[in-house]
């Protein structure tokens, strides 16, 4: 791998001048974003602004028009096939839709990435799946259940267990608490914070949940006008002069949370 300086070493993901579009629809235009080691970055923006597109581009599921993406200091374009493979294994993903394969049990879902990247005996994969299930706070019996037999909160936890299957360093969560009731969402947030602390994860979390932003995110980035419009703390958001940011962070729902903190 390339040599990187000590400071750059703390940047887990660096996106520079990223442009992504579909036909004439430019979704992201020269977007810049850095994510630092050990932080939980909350990523927000109006619906359809490109939050999922950014995540999918970083994961190389979508093609970009221009710009560079460095993960753990390594420029993907300059990486060898072996380096890319090693890098992919260090990324965990919880997608916005289709969190789990419905035809597979929880255990089998968690083992999908293991089968894809590792060559392990079944007994070892079973043991690893058991550990991941425990890690995300699911009961051992959940292992042999199908997604249709689980509650919304359990599905999110199982999907998180699959994202953690290969012990990633950087985890992408696309609206992980959407569809959960406030208590379920708060419990999921606590789990994320706990895993960050115990596993040393770096977390990129797309969320619409103001409670999550206030309670677990260290830093917030707002996507708007095809760029990261503003990034920083809640205070930085409150001070930022943009109508969408103001109505989002100072709206009715936000006020009741701000008062609590
Ligand atoms: N595969 C695709 N093909 C064409 N357009 C797409 C595709 N994926 C996303 N888009 C467009 O990109 C924009 C951003 O979408 P998305 O990233 O899903 O928004 P969100 O911020 O809600 O996650 C939308 O206008 C959407 O229609
Ligand atoms: Mg989305």
Image: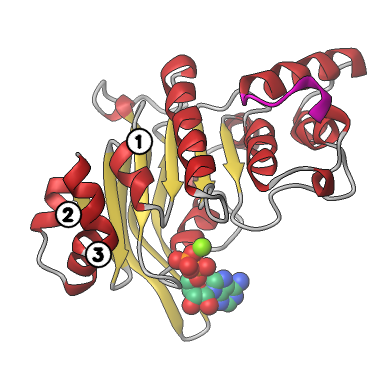
Residue 233 in view (yes/no):
no
What residue does disc 3 label?
A: 252
The answer for how far apart the CA atoms under marks 1 and 2 are is: 16 Å
Q: What residue is drawn where x is 55% and y is 63%?
A: 63
Residue 136 pos. (x, y %): 62, 26
| Quarter of the view holding residue 88 | top right
Q: Earlier in the sequence, mark 1 or mark 2?
A: 1
Residue 126 pos. (x, y %): 85, 18
Q: Earlier in the sequence, mark 2 or mark 3?
A: 2
The answer for how far apart the CA atoms under marks 2 and 3 are is: 16 Å
Q: Secondary structure at mark 3?
A: helix
Q: Is residue 31 above or below residue 174?
A: below
Provide the residue span drawn in magenta. Answer: 136-142
Q: Is residue 80 above or below residue 130?
A: below
Residue 165 in view (yes/no):
yes
Q: Secondary structure at mark 1?
A: loop
Do residues under tags 2 and 3 come within 8 Å of each other at their CB atoms?
no
Residue 74 pos. (x, y %): 44, 35
Viewer-closest of 95 and 5: 95
Q: What residue is drawn where x is 69% and y is 49%?
A: 99
Viewer-closest of 253 and 166: 253
What residue does disc 1 label?
A: 216
Q: Secondary structure at mark 2?
A: helix
Do residues under tags 1 and 2 come within 8 Å of each other at their CB atoms?
no
What residue does disc 2 label?
A: 237
């Amino acid at each position: 791998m390339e040599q990187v300086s000590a400071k750059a070493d703390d940047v887990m993901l660096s996106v520079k001048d990223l442009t992504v579009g579909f036909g004439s629809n430019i979704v992201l235009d020269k977007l810049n974003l850095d994510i630092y080691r050990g932080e939980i970055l909350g990523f927000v923006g109006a619906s359809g602004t490109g939050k999922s597109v950014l995540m999918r581009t970083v994961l190389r599921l979508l093609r970009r028009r221009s710009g560079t993406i460095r993960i753990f200091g390594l420029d993907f374009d300059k990486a060898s096939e072996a380096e890319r493979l090693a890098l992919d294994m260090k990324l965990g993903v919880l997608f916005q839709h289709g969190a789990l394969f419905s035809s597979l049990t929880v255990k089998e879902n968690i083992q999908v990435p293991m089968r894809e990247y590792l060559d392990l005996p079944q007994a070892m994969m079973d043991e690893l799946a058991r550990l991941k299930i425990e890690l995300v706070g699911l009961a051992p019996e959940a292992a042999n259940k199908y997604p249709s037999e689980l509650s919304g909160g359990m599905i999110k936890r199982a999907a998180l267990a699959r994202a953690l299957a290969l012990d990633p360093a950087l985890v992408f969560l696309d609206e992980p608490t959407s569809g959960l009731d406030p208590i379920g969402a708060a419990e999921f947030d606590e789990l994320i914070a706990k895993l960050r602390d115990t596993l040393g994860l770096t977390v990129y979390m797309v969320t619409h949940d103001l409670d999550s932003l206030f309670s677990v995110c260290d830093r917030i980035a707002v996507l708007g006008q095809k760029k990261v419009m503003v990034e920083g703390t809640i205070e930085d958001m409150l001070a930022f002069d943009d109508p969408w940011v103001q109505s989002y962070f100072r709206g009715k729902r936000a006020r009741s949370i701000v008062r609590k903190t």
